[in-house]
Image (cartoon, grey):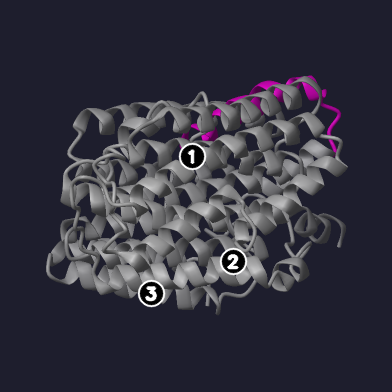
Amino acid sequence: MSAVLLIAIPLLAAFLSILSKKLAPVLLLLVAAANIILIFFVPSGIVVIGGFDLPYGINLFFDTYAKISLIVVNALFLVVSLLNISEHKKMSSILLVSLAGLNGLLLTGDLFNLFVFLEVAGIAAYLITTTNKKPLSTFNYLVIGSVGSILYLFGLMILYGMFGTLNLMDMVYSIQNSSVAYSSLLLPFFFMFVGLGVEAKLLPFNAWVKGILKHSNTLSGPMIASVYAATISFVFGRLITNLFQFEGKLLLVVTILLVAGVVIGEAMAFASTKAREILLFSSISQACITILLFVNGIIIWAVYLIIANALSKLVLYLVVNKAAKQTESDDVEALQGLFVKNILVGIAFTVAALSVMGLPLFVGFVIKLNYLTNLVLMDQLLVVGLILIASLVEGIYFVKLLVKLWFKGDNEIDVKFNVSYKLVFAVITLLIIVFGTYTKPLENFDNGIDTVQDQIEVIYHG
């Protein structure tokens, strides 16, 4: 088995699906399910494509980090596809291209091919958001996303001019063993950081987010806020922990941007009266925390945070978007009493929200406690203080939202959730509670992720 199949099969299926509209949905679900199984049979290591030896050949890098990220992203992708296939059959070919692009982002060991896969996944995302039927918002996303890709490419061009390589491992090795002044790396690192920050929803590079997610549906909302968000966070983490070197003034600037993103995101969510806006601003804040953890080298808990947020946001966006479609409004007042006749759905939504808040008995609490402890040990007391203040604000607006949704209002609201939705909600709720109360598997896995640096030691030093 080769990691190439995780990209090639969805791409081939996308071409085949064009030939038959009836076959397309079936191909989508079969390929998405097959990819998850295939991940467990792919051996760890580097796959060189094109017949050229490293560092010149195009390569895919399949390690523990890639395996975890692929399992999470492909599983989420399958769930979102299953729940939406009957309503969005016409998107099947596009979703297959999207899957190929997302897997490529998680596997590539070549910095230029990362740009290529970023474009492939991005184009698919733009087309997926057309289901919102807000063409101006999609156009804004396309323009801003293109600018982000160009900035990433511009930063990469500068690095290539300095070191003459595009291979991630070779680039890291060259930087570590060069006499190039750190000040010369500030510009390309910052350009690449900003470029990826656009897709990662980091403030102030996320002007596209509001237009897309506040009009999202049960396909575009979970796909962008959960599947795509998890993918870009994993990719960002790979580069931050291996390639980017944040020191001195650059570290200070990046830290200020990320902490400001956390605080501003929560403040904007607090001020909003629309359910989808509350979720999107909360997502911005959580994305900033995730990248902040990677910047500080807290890798394992950043990975856990990505997974926990992806699961929680999947539930939250599915519930809100399903309700908004049937009631034709996502105003909190209009959704009051949503859970009166949907007890199971209400429990799932509540558990997901409480986990995002970081309350005890849920996995979000375990993750928050551990990453805050790590930040305290690193003397990041100001950062910890600001995160705690933001968490308090987050708790207030989520509690207000939950109270509205649980208690009946003046108008009776009746939203139908089919069995497949309830099954997904039940499984995710169980996972959030189990790993929030039985934390040993999380603790035992600490430091269990190998890195590009480990592979560099093998290749260059035997």
Q: Residue placed at 27% from the left, 30% from the top?
A: 137
- Regarding residue 149, the answer to whether it shows in the image is no
| Range drawn in magenta | 177-200
Q: Residue placed at 38% from the left, 74% from the top?
A: 33
Point out the frontmost of discs 2 and 1.
Answer: 1
User: Between residues 351 and 182, which one lies in front from this camera angle?
Assistant: 351
- How dense is the environment of label 2, judged by Cα within 10 Å: few (below 14), some, or many (20 and up)? some
User: Between residues 335 and 315, which one lies in front from this camera angle?
Assistant: 335
Q: Residue 67, which numbered label?
A: 2
Place residue 421 in its image quadrant.
bottom left
Q: Which residue is mark 3?
A: 33
Tell me if 462 is positioned left or right of 146 in this view: right
| Residue 9 image offset from top left, x and y in percent | 37, 68
Q: Could you tell me how far apart the alpha carbons at marks 1 and 3 are, in whole angstroms?
A: 30 Å
- Regarding residue 28, the answer to whether it shows in the image is yes
Tell me if 340 is positioned left or right of 246 in this view: left
Tell me if 209 is positioned left or right of 190 in this view: left
| Sequence-earlier tag: 2 or 1 | 2
**Helix, strand or loop for the magenta stretch, by majority:** helix
Q: Is residue 169 above or below residue 390?
A: below
- Three-letter code for the amino acid on which mark 2 is drawn: Lys
Q: Could you tell me how far apart the alpha carbons at marks 3 and 2 are, in whole angstroms?
A: 16 Å
Q: Could you tell me how far apart the alpha carbons at marks 2 and 1 are, in whole angstroms?
A: 27 Å
Q: Which residue is mark 1?
A: 282
Tell me if 97 is positioned left or right of 69 in this view: left
| Residue 22 image offset from top left, x and y in percent | 12, 70
